[in-house]
Amino acid sequence: MNARVIVPLLVMLLVGYFVWDQYQQGRVALPGIQPVASPAAPPAVTTTTTDNSALEPIDFVVKSEPKKILQLMNAKNYAEGLTASDAWLRRNPTDALIGLIRENAIVDLSNSGSYTIGVSAPLTGALKQVGEAFLQGVLLAVRQVNSSGGFQRGTEVNRIKVRVLNDAGDRAEAIKVASLFAKDKLIWGVIGPYSSSTLLAAAPIYNNSSNVIIAPAATNPRISDAGPNIYRVAPSDTTQGASLARLVLARGQKSVAVLFDADDAYSSGLAASFKTEAVKIGLVTSDTPFTLNSYTVAKVGNYAVDAIFVAGYTNDVAAVAKLEKGFGKAIFAGDGAYGQDLIAQGGNAVEGVIVTSFWHSTLTDANSKRFTAQFSSLFGGGTPNANAVQAYDATRTLIEALRRAKQLKSGADVRAALETMRVTPSVGVTAPVRFDANGDVIGRPWVAIAVKRNASGKLVFQAVGYAK
């Protein structure tokens, strides 16, 4: 065959094969035919190394069954969605995210008046466990209100809906979440964010919107000056650090190495208040700066100190305990270190570590026992932690503000109702929720908790008194 014929024919065959291959992969369409992706083609691979961009639950929930439930609820296919959520919750009763989505659907179907509140929580990343506890506390408070028929304002009876956004425990993401809530005209207040750093980063957005926030667990002293729309039900680190210093001295320690990260608001604030009180009571301190999530080489146990105070989180204290426990130094930490991750990551090394927290399930006062029973009933026998209690009290406080408000035309009305709690407090588990002029809670106690072995030899947390 003539080369003039063969070459064009080969080119046409190659082009045709390429187009057909692209069609099979769904990348091009042929005239009159819809592109079909090859069933053998692998899913697209993302090069993202962080899940911080995930905000809405449907974006970050990865398990197929709860993701399907979210899709059904978003499509307002409530009949199928409720059936699926009930089946899921029977097997996973502690999944408060699906519990809240289910609660929203029931409120919609009841066709009753409602108010929507927001939640900014770390539902992915290192602080995911905290976010899950937050949602459990929120769900318990909301369920109690809605199942009793709602709350009454004049002749109106209203129920509560919740919009949950994931801030991943990240400052930039917390700002994005605050911006989304600011644009959502249905939001009447926000629970969260969790950490002091994320709250301080997002505070300007909230202060320039109509949304008040009630932070369940942020404790940095700078939050006192964070703005008029910022409230919190966690006492300031000024009181926690001072309580911890007195606790260290009361347990017979005379000198202590203070580990802190100057670039983290929680860590630096807690350490500063600890050292200020230490000077007053004669406890000798020595600074040991470190970077959060990176305690690997220092051995402060070699120093001439009796104890180590770690102003950090669960993973930091676990790392310190593993390296320092052999030196026989007592180890203390604040509320950021309280969580099952401390035991899971630290193992035998964290036995004897003492942390402070807002609450513990081993407390035996009437309010604590009642809350524990209510939580256990809703979450299939589960045991609540301090973060669940704080989120519960924050949510009840916000709902109480909605009930008290003389009118509800803007977020300013919610803030005015919260201001009444400077005189007439809201109900709280460990103490009534009373705010001062800065939106700080007054009179919340700190609980001292030790890692101990129970009768079966398992490491557990046990309340050992109050850090006064």
Image (cartoon, grey):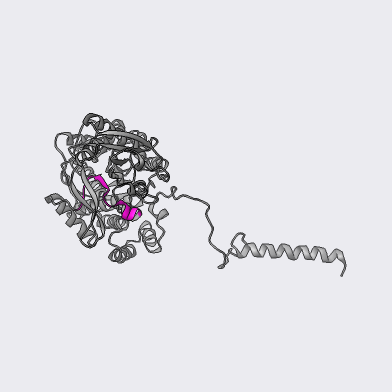
Please name whichever residue, 103 or 79, is drawn nearer the observer in this view of the structure.
103
| Residue at the spot 38% in from the left edge and 35% down from the top edge | 262
Residue 279 or residue 408, whichever sits in front: 279
- Furthest residue toward left: 366
Residue drawn at x 29%, y 30% is 225
Which residue is more in the foreground, 17 or 133? 133
Q: Tell me residue 269's x, y (percent).
A: 32, 35
On whether residue 354 falls in the magenta region, the answer is: yes
Task: Classify 46 as above or below 178.
Answer: below
Is 440 situated left or right of 120 in this image?
left
Q: Is residue 409 visible?
A: no
Which quarter of the figure has residue 377?
A: bottom left
Is residue 426 or residue 34 the one in the foreground? 426
Residue 348 picture quarter: bottom left
The C terminus sits in image quarter: top left
User: Looking at the picture, how far across and down is residue 434, in whole percent?
Assistant: 18, 37
Q: Position of residue 254 (x, y in %)?
A: 24, 36
Q: Say if residue 142 shows up in the picture.
A: yes
Is residue 459 in the magenta section?
A: no
Q: Position of residue 384 (x, y in %)?
A: 23, 54
Q: Residue furthest right?
A: 2
> What's drawn in magenta, residue-wise?
345-361
Quadrant in which the N terminus is drawn: bottom right
Q: Is residue 304 above or below residue 453?
A: above
Residue occupying image coordinates x 16% and y 44%:
427
- Is residue 346 found left or right of 235 in the rendered image? right
